[in-house]
Image (cartoon, rainbow, N blue to C red):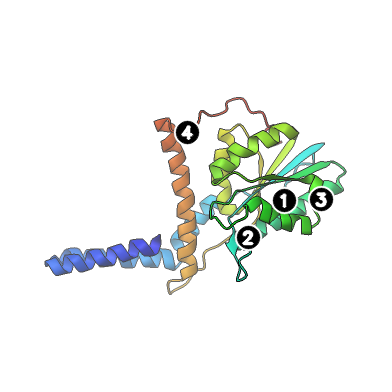
Amino acid sequence: MSLAVLGMLVLLAGGLAWRGYRRGSVAVVLVALAGTLAVGDGPLPGWMLDRLQTGYTTQPSAPWAARNVILLLGAGTVRDVEGQAEPPLYGYGRIARAAVLYRQCHASGNDCKVLASGGDPLHNGHSEAAVYGDLLLALGVPAADLMLEQRSLSTWQNAQFSRPLLLAYQPQRVLLVSSGLHLRRSLLYFAHFGIRPEPVRGDLVRAVPSWLPQAWNAALFDAALHEYIGLVRYRVYNALGKNAPPVTAPLIPAAR
């Protein structure tokens, strides 16, 4: 997204120069340069990521309840060189965190389930839930304690389609595992459906301060901007009545 905007600014500057608007062309070039430095050198994505990721931990503090659900959100899938679907960069941290939490919960002697949520929005042939579920099985989560929600194609649908599965199990405690930058939007969407889980961060990303623009910082800016757009879109859709009516009476207990 940031590269597309930069490209449009360059084209605009060239068009203004060709039309003879020299001052306008120089102004656009300066804006493009300032934006490139703010994004590529790290200060802007760093500020955005801090606001998204602050306050989320990798370990819950409250004791385990009698019935617990560790709700793992998918981060998509990618195809390897043999055409097999596997988690992308942001997926493995979430999976590992969910597996660690399950082992801790199981060791407490309480009942524990892992609910992996995610369909196949990228059409790679396997749902995120199934791909992540295979890895969870390999990491020691028994099939009897693994639940799969394989219909959702977005974070909104993660919340919408996970609700019936949670209601069927009736947990006393729900932990939501996702990437640190994804948790704020996820919690907003789940709260809309009356689900108020405890957030647990599967990974943390940071911008890299640099004197020269870095592609990593531009990628993080795009990821953070996607989250902010989702937060704004939720409120706009609510104001326009385009979202489903919110669930006002929570059926899943609030985080303790």
Query: Which label lies toward us, 1 or 4?
Result: 4
Please say if the residues under marks 1 and 4 sit with CB atoms less than 8 Å apart.
Answer: no
Residue pointed to by mark 3: 142
Residue pointed to by mark 4: 243
Residue in the image at 46% along x and 70% along y: 215
Residue type at numbered disc 1: Gln
User: Which percent across, then down, holds residue 31?
Assistant: 29, 63
Q: Earlier in the sequence, mark 1 or mark 3?
A: 1
Q: Secondary structure at mark 2?
A: loop
Query: Which label lies toward us, 1 or 3?
Result: 3
Residue pointed to by mark 2: 87
Separation of marks 1 and 2 at Cα, in angstroms: 22 Å
Separation of marks 2 and 3 at Cα, in angstroms: 20 Å
Query: Which label lies toward us, 4 or 3?
Result: 3
Residue type at numbered disc 3: Pro
User: Which percent across, then down, holds residue 192?
Assistant: 55, 34
User: Which percent across, then down, holds residue 124?
Assistant: 57, 58
In the image, taking residue 159 as reference, residue 113 lies left or right, namely: right
Q: Secondary structure at mark 1?
A: loop
Residue in the image at 73% along x and 37% along y: 173
Q: Earlier in the sequence, mark 4 or mark 3?
A: 3
Residue pointed to by mark 1: 59
Residue 73 seen = yes
User: Badge 1 local density, few (<14 within 10 Å), some, or many (20+)?
Assistant: few
Q: How many marks?
A: 4
